[in-house]
Amino acid sequence: MSKVILITGGSSGIGRAIATYLSEKNDYIVYGSSRNLNKLENTPFLPVELDVTSEQSINDCVEKIIKDQGRIDVLINNAGVGITGPLEETPNSEIEKHFKTNLYGPINLIKKVLPNMRKNNAGLIINITSIAGHIGTPFRSIYSAGKSSLDIISETLNMETKDFNVNVVCIAPGDYLTNISKGRFHSPVIEGSPYELKYDSSLKKMNENITKGADPIKVAKLVDKIIRLKNPRKKYISGSFLERFGIVLKFILPQKFFEFLVLKLF
């Protein structure tokens, strides 16, 4: 029986790579979502309209797939946006908008699909977080906060759903070659600000890292592997050796020395 899969944020980047790769497999029925269906034209997967910041849109999307297929076996919460800036200078309106997309969206989708998964006594939820949720870097406090929150929610949720045979898994990617920087909210570099020089330098470094990022197909293959495992691990890190080793260093180095290294890099 083919697994029915819903992937949010399927119009670009990691989400599109996952949806495209999985749709090439004969044992999957893949739905990829976007707020704008025009962005999903000529895709090999089934397009579905979804705005993760709208509970009504979430309800409509999930109910449509369950009506068409009878179930959702796998939910992949991938849709997300970036945000950068000194915390002091980041508008509250943008902070709230960010959490509505990166945190509340996945929470509401999980709440909507769980009754169906529980009814079927089977299911898999994969939350795409970020290495930034494990290692905080300057001028990304809000982004890191959203991703780390989703990580700990996944950890606790997995214990809550164990009795229903529903697995909850996190994948934390590092820098991948996507267009996230184009959709990211950048607090402006304010001339004369006490953060001006360091923020401007850090912003250039962030964008440079993305242009040197790996092919998102690597994450897509990892997702396929996880779906096929009977007992997947609960957390996966997908990034360069330096990114993965950085998480290890955070726990073995003195905090002040680790912070010194982060400041040197970013």
Image (spheres, rainbow, N blue to C red):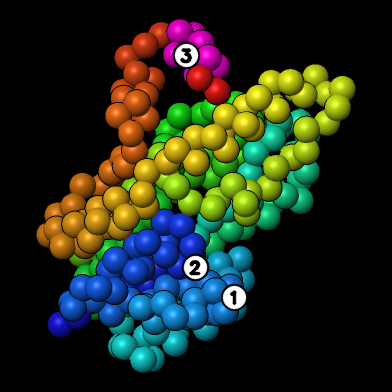
As drawn, is 253 to the left or to the right of 85?
left
Image x and y of residue 172, in percent: 37, 43
Q: Tell whether position 259 is magenta.
A: yes
Residue 55's place in the image compared with 99, above or below, is below
Q: Residue 261 carries which label?
A: 3
Range covered by the magenta-colored residues: 255-264
Q: Are marks 2 and 1 in contact (CB under 8 Å)?
A: yes
* Residue drawn where x is 42% and y is 45% of the image: 176
Given residues 49 and 54, the one toward you in this image is 49
Q: Which of the marked residues, 3 or 1, is nearer the chain's N terminus?
A: 1
Q: Which mark is residue 11?
A: 2
Q: What element carries label 2?
A: loop
- Closest to the camera, between mark 3 and mark 2, is 2
Q: Which mark is residue 255?
A: none
Residue 164's place in the image compared with 45, above or below, is above
Label 1 environment density (alpha carbons within 10 Å; few <14, some 14–19, many ≥20): some
Q: Work out how far the residue at label 3 is from the one at label 2, CA to CA, in angstroms.
A: 36 Å
* Residue drawn where x is 50% and y is 41% of the image: 211
Q: Hey, what amino acid is under mark 2?
A: Ser
The quarter in which the N terminus is drawn is: bottom left
